[in-house]
Amino acid sequence: MAAPRERILLVHVVLHGEADPDAGAEFFHLATDSGADVLELLSVQRGRPDPATFLGRGKVAELAERVAALSVDLVLFDRVLSPVQERNLEGALHCRVVDRVGLILDIFARRARTHEGKLQVELAQLTRLRTRLVRGWTHLERQRGGIGLRGPGETQLETDRRLIGERILSLRGRLIKVAAHRATQRRARQRAPLPTVALVGYTNAGKSSLFNTLTKSSSYAADRLFATLDPAIRRLQIEGHEAILLADTVGFLRDLPTDLIAAFRATLEEVNQAQLLLHVVDSSAPDRDAQIAAVDAVLREIGAEDIPRLLVLNKVELTGDMPGNVYESSGKLAAVRVSAHSGIGIPELLQAVTQRVGRSMLRADLTLMPEEGALRARIHRLASVIAERFDEQGRTHLTFDIDGLNWRRLHTQMRDSGCQAMDAPPTIPVDG
């Protein structure tokens, strides 16, 4: 029998002078994605936050009446609350109170699939919990004296904080090992120097759908926030050009807390190592410009603001816009309109990517002597072998496609080693 769904009331707070691009629509989407039963969304205007409750006594009293009338189990705030504010609100509302960060962490915990993703989520959760331990131990903090009022309150808190601190250190150590393993994999990829292109963008912009369309893979993609928490990297072969490595990454969000960015820094390293960022945007989103600004802010936070970027306006099937290239008045390519769902606009996107990072491929024919097995292995590693046959003398006849840079490296190795292969086999551009 399924457990009853939590009854939730949402509080969307807008401070004086702040922009409110979506009137709480994103917050509502986050809450419904958590699997709870959302009863109501209340919007509150305030001049400035109240240090004790964020809302002030009058608004808290009104909210308490609404909570009682609706039999609410949990109140979610679209703000980052201090531990004191959470504790005071819970006392006044007589129900649990969770802020925006707690909600995001809960969604992250549900969506993490890989070992690294789960470690990152647990680290962020414990880092946050350590500052809020007092909420769970108020019954042990009574140190006034008297029968039944003396106890190990502070000792228990200190013990709990120490245990959480030890767990945080352990998690950080394990994540360092994971990051080192990822760095080893990255170095291995760099030995076969394929350019890396990373998909970045606001959560639910369609990055994973575009990733699957481009690479013909089946990474998890869904119409929900933070469907992807773990990076995926696939080889993408573009006809007539060298292959590239395409990386899918976690989606960004407005006001994403620094602790969360720090916890997922290892995942976001793929962004920092890319030669080109494809900034995927949901072109149908009413607050599209605000989402673009939020992604730009996170890229600055992780030190990736100087990496070349190409704007990809996704979901044109929902807007009615024409797919294809969008140019500035100067004639420079500004964006590419695509639909990851239907595939329209994808050829123009691939062409734009190859113009930025792609190298043209050459087709070569080469005959190797029997003792030149090491050269044969290197060709298989650096090139795409089209045909291979062996003659009666044990010689190997190869036809392969290779980009110009790797061909020059291969030709230098042949010359320096004095191999008996054709000195400079004719090469022709591959039609693409």
Image (tube, rainbow, N blue to C red):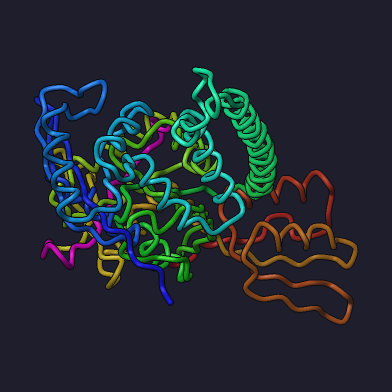
Residue 325 x/y as whole percent? 21, 55
Residue 199 is a magenta residue: no
Say above or below: 194 vs 132: below
Residue at 66% of width from left, 57% of height from top?
A: 382
User: Magenta stretch containing residue 308, yes or no?
Assistant: yes
Q: Is residue 226 left or right of residue 42?
A: right
Determine the image quadrant of residue 291.
Answer: top left
Q: Specify whether 21 is left or right of 387.
A: left
- Residue 95 vertical position relative to residue 130 in the rendered view, above or below: below
- Closest to the observer: 19 or 143? 143
Q: Quadrant of the N terminus?
A: bottom left
Residue at the (64%, 40%) spot, across then down: 175
Residue 383 position, x and y percent, is 64, 61
- Quarter of the image containing the C terminus? bottom left
Q: How many marks?
A: 0
Residue sitting nearer the eye, 84 or 169: 84
Query: Residue 211: x and y, percent?
Result: 41, 61
Residue that protrudes farthest toward the top in the picture? 144
Q: Residue visible at 77% across and 47% down?
A: 415
Magenta range: 304-321
Q: Nearer the viewer, residue 151 or 264?
A: 151
In this rendering, position of residue 207 left or right of residue 416:
left
Tell me where residue 83 sits by quadrant.
Answer: top left
